[in-house]
Amino acid sequence: MTSVILQRVLAVILLLIAFLALAASKAFPFLDDIPGVAKSAIAVAGAACGLTGVWLWLRKTPDQP
């Protein structure tokens, strides 16, 4: 049971990071000063956090059928 709770907490944190990263890649005007590679890196890192968060949320524990 504790494993599921830790997975869900980590998933929520990763999904929050993903949301903030993807919002930051579009919303803030100061991003005009950074190169396109950095913007892409922010977007890729946000997408990776989002996918990992979804995977953790949906992952079954060994005791589940």
Image: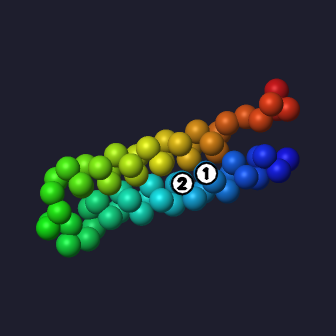
Tell me: residue 65, above or below residue 11: above
C-alpha separation, residue under disc 1 versus residue under disc 2: 5 Å
Label 2, secondary structure: give it: helix
Give percent across and percent down for residue 11.
Answer: 61, 51
Density class for disc 1 (Cα within 10 Å; few <14, some 14-19, many ≥20) is many
Tell me: residue 16, above or below residue 48: below
Q: Judge left or right: residue 7 versus residue 3.
A: left
* Scheme of image coloration: rainbow
Q: Quadrant of the C terminus?
A: top right
* Residue drawn at 80 percent across, 31 percent down: 62
Density class for disc 2 (Cα within 10 Å; few <14, some 14-19, many ≥20) is many
Circle 1: residue type: Ala
Q: Judge left or right: residue 48 versus residue 61.
A: left
Q: Judge left or right: residue 30 versus residue 52.
A: left
State yes or no: discs 1 and 2 in contact (Cβ < 8 Å).
Answer: yes
Q: Which residue is mark 1?
A: 11
Give percent across and percent down for residue 7.
Answer: 69, 48
Give percent across and percent down for residue 24.
Answer: 32, 64
Specify the label residue 14 is tagged with: 2
Label 1, secondary structure: give it: helix
Give percent across and percent down for residue 13.
Answer: 57, 59
* Residue drawn at 73 percent across, 52 percent down: 6
Circle 2: residue type: Leu
56 or 37, which lies in front?
Answer: 37
